Amino acid sequence: MERGWAGEQLVAAAQRGDREAISAIVYGAHPHVRRFAHHLCASSDDAEEAAQEALITLYRKIGTLRATTALASWMFRIVRNECLRRARHLLDSRPETAVTAEDAVASAEDEVLRMLDADELANAIAALPDLQRRVLIMRDVLGYPGRTTADALGLSVAAMKSQLHRARAAIRHSLVHHP
């Protein structure tokens, strides 16, 4: 978020419960939150809903913010978590298949690794160009078929595959070279 849209005095007043300050912050945060959500979420609908949820959370919980200078990073975490929650919900709602004990152990190990790397991965995905990020989320997170992904984004299947390859390569590079 840009510096200056919510000064420390305004945030401090909002933390004390000043409704005008809270409204000013929510209004000022709105375009930044929407832009970030559109970069991170898989679809425009999810982005709009994630942005609204983040602004509602901001309105309700600004008093719990510890440092007045941490507002932007707090908002970005809320949006990121909401986008990830929505993606997980879509994955969880897909039809179940039979799982063996071996699959369950592998899945548990994978889940632990995913949790450890979730922040790095979310940051790497957020850093991707918009089209690559959308292709990656639709194919690898949401599990959409290639043709469906290509059609939804107005691409040929070959162009979608090229964008997916670039996105995966960028993620691998980012995660391998992460400090």
Image (cartoon, grey):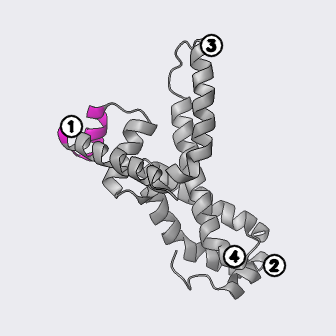
Q: In this figure, which residue is indicated by the disc labeled 3?
A: 101
Classify residue 59 as left or right of residue 37: right
Front residue (pair 58, 128): 128
Which is nearer the N-term, disc 3 or disc 1? 3
Query: Label 2 amino acid?
Result: Arg
Which is nearer the N-term, disc 3 or disc 4? 4
The magenta stretch is 146-158
Secondary structure type for disc 3: helix
Which is nearer the N-term, disc 2 or disc 1? 2
Query: Horizontal and vertical percent for residue 118?
Result: 57, 47
Whether 93 is among the magenta residues is no
Distance between mark 4 and mark 2 Cα atoms = 9 Å
Query: Horizontal and vertical percent for residue 16?
Result: 81, 78
Which callout, 3 or 1, points to the residue nearer the camera? 3
Secondary structure type for disc 4: helix
Query: Horizontal and vertical percent for residue 174?
Result: 43, 54
Q: Mark 1, residues whose alpha carbon is within 10 Å: few (<14), some, or many (≥20)?
A: some
Q: Please name the residue shown 57% across and 46% down the image.
A: 117
Classify residue 3 as left or right of residue 22: left
Q: In this figure, which residue is indicated by the disc labeled 2?
A: 16
Q: Please name the residue shown 34% across and 47% down the image.
A: 169
Q: Mark 2, residues whose alpha carbon is within 10 Å: few (<14), some, or many (≥20)?
A: some
**Mark 3–mark 1 contact, CB under 8 Å?**
no
